[in-house]
Image: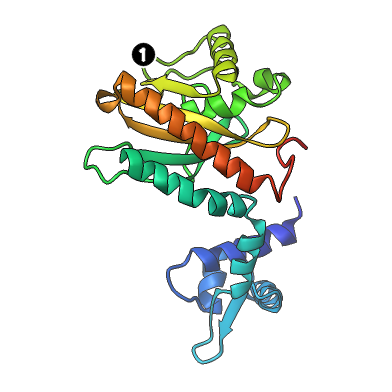
Amino acid sequence: MVKPLFKAMQVLRIVCESSQALTLKDITELSEIPKSTVYRYLYTLIAMDMIDYNSNNETFSPGLGLWWLMQSADPFSKLRQVSSKERRSLMRKFNETVNLGVLTGSEVLYLEIVESARSLRMQAQPGARDDIHSTALGKVLLAFRPRSQWEALIPEKLVRHTDKTLVQRNEVLANLEEIRRTGFAIEYGENEDGATCIAAPILDSNGVSLAAVSVSAPSSRITDALKKEIIVELSKCCAIIENKFIRDIPNSAGR
């Protein structure tokens, strides 16, 4: 570990996590770093526009440079943008929650969620994570990755979230094969009791999953007829997103 860098990031984090602008004394006390050292870190971060200094009240606050850094560091900004219209259209058609997710390690990360207007609806938070093996999003994302990645990304110990969760590796692998064959994933209460989720992948030009979109709802509302309709519309939605996205970023997940 590079200690000076660690301490500088500690100072930056303290400034960013505060609900109000801080003085040099405040930051010194919170970081427990010598005042002269804190000052040098702050001066450097100000030069990089990561921190702003208000000379009127001698306080420090997050700088505009952080915003620019976040914009350039978000690898999913284009995906969010090009998929927004289709995801919202899907939500309006079925009035059920629509999720956009990607793989991160052995988990699925929820990038964006368009919530249903119904009082009884499935809810998650952007930035939340779930296990691959128990979610339709996670399984459809993994199913459309090279099979060589399946064993590596499926955790050694599969957590049982409900009595319907698949916790045997051979069952999960068989499920992935079926998903790859049909082109979509459905989980009935595997991650949460009483919840059904249907997911389809967004693929690159090599057929490798970039992301996935799902429709989730209380199981009591998902009839066989509605399930078939959701699968058709969800597949159309993902195909439109693919065509928009891979025109500019081909093979992005296959590298």
In the rendered image, the vertical position of residue 85 relative to residue 242, given as above or below: below
Number of residues whose C-alpha sits closer than 10 Å to that of mark 1, classed few (under 14), some (14–19) or many (20 or more): few
Answer left or right for 13 relative to 125: right
Q: Amino acid at mark 1?
A: Asp
> From where the camera sits, is residue 34 visible?
yes
What residue is disc 1 on?
163
Q: Nearer the viewer, residue 14 or 121?
A: 121
Q: How is the image coloured?
A: rainbow
Residue 74 sits above or below residue 144 on the image: below
Task: Report if residue 124 is visible in the image.
Answer: no
Name the residue at 29% across, 22% down: 223
In the image, taking residue 184 as reference, residue 228 lies left or right, namely left
In depth, the one of 178 and 9 nearer the eye is 178
* Camera-nearest residue between 29 and 125: 125
Q: Position of residue 122 (x, y in %)?
A: 32, 36
Q: Residue at x 57, y 37 (%)?
A: 239
Q: Residue furthest left?
A: 119
Percent across and percent down for residue 195 are 33, 26
Q: Residue at x 44, y 40 (%)?
A: 99
Compared with residue 127, is residue 8 higher up or lower down, i.e. above or below?
A: below
Q: Residue furthest bottom?
A: 56
The spot of residue 183 in percent (x, y) is 55, 23
Element class at badge 1? loop
Q: Position of residue 170 (x, y in %)?
A: 57, 7
